Image: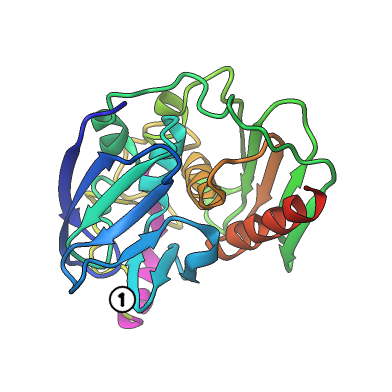
Amino acid sequence: MFKSFQLSGIGLHSGAKTTVKISPAPKGKGRYFVRIDLPNKPIIPANIDYIATTTLSTELSNEGAKIRTVEHLLASLIGCGIDDAQIEIDGSEVPLLDGSAQEWVNNLDYISDKPFESVIDTITEAIWVRKDDAFCAVLPSTEIKFSYGVDYPYSVLQNQWFSWYPQRESFVTAIAPARTFGFADQIEQLQKAGLIKGGSLENALVCDKDGWLNPPLRFENEAVRHKLLDLIGDLSLLGKIPTAHYLAYKASHQLHTELAKKIKQSLAINN
């Protein structure tokens, strides 16, 4: 059991400051948000059935209440083996903090070395989702593992691949420190669209055609590790991530969550 704690920070897209308090929840309650700033303090389950939008982040909603950019925090919880957690927040977006999951895991004093070993469900046949040449897939496997690839038109982000085996390297050291990233030539356009108002060189890696604007990196392949962090956060909306090999290439929150929905459907049929 972990101890309750709270952190405050700026939201990536809203630019608004919020405070999050995370506390243990009763066994079987799952992970869920509570909008304490709204009347009646509505609850938003961290569940695949409550996805609202997936534009540059994952947003959940329930009965009109919304919570955005949930993926890093949720990845931290499942990556530390925490199935049940109450997440109280006084605004509509989870703070970005330093752009990674590092501060969340540093405050979760209950750490499981093998967070996925209690999973009962296994994938028995391949499931794919795709958009153009980007895809997400899940393949049958005797152990849980993740592989991700990115290929952007920038010299420092071409043809990066990374595979993570939770049994061999912990989430805390291999995935959590990887920060979100963006591109200098897209910032103005995204801000005009009402996005990334809270983004800065302090909470995101930024690159242009010549390289990274704010080195040093925490890993040589920090960007693709962060994409894997996002994938784990999105897959956590299944409650437990089934035993399988998860494979993604040039994917997005939309493809991540589409895959999660198909996995849920497949398990419901097979069970």
Q: Is residue 187 above or below residue 205?
A: below
Q: Which residue is mark 1?
A: 191
Query: Is residue 160 visible in the rendered structure shown here?
Result: yes
Task: Give the image location of residue 65, x and y in percent.
Answer: 32, 73
Q: Which image quadrant is residue 134 in?
A: bottom right
Q: Which residues are magenta?
A: 178-193
Secondary structure beneath disc 1? helix
Comparing 158 with 56, the one in front is 56
Comparing 52 with 35, the one in front is 35
Q: In the orientation shown, which residue stands out farthest toward the bottom? A: 192
Residue type indicated by callout 1:
Gln
Query: Is residue 211 visible in the rendered structure shown here?
Result: no
Q: Is residue 70 above or below residue 176?
A: below
Task: Give the image location of residue 163, x and y in percent.
Answer: 63, 32
Task: Give the image location of residue 208, x and y in percent.
Answer: 41, 58
Residue sitting at 66 percent across and 49 percent down?
248
Residue sitting at 53 percent across and 43 percent down?
228
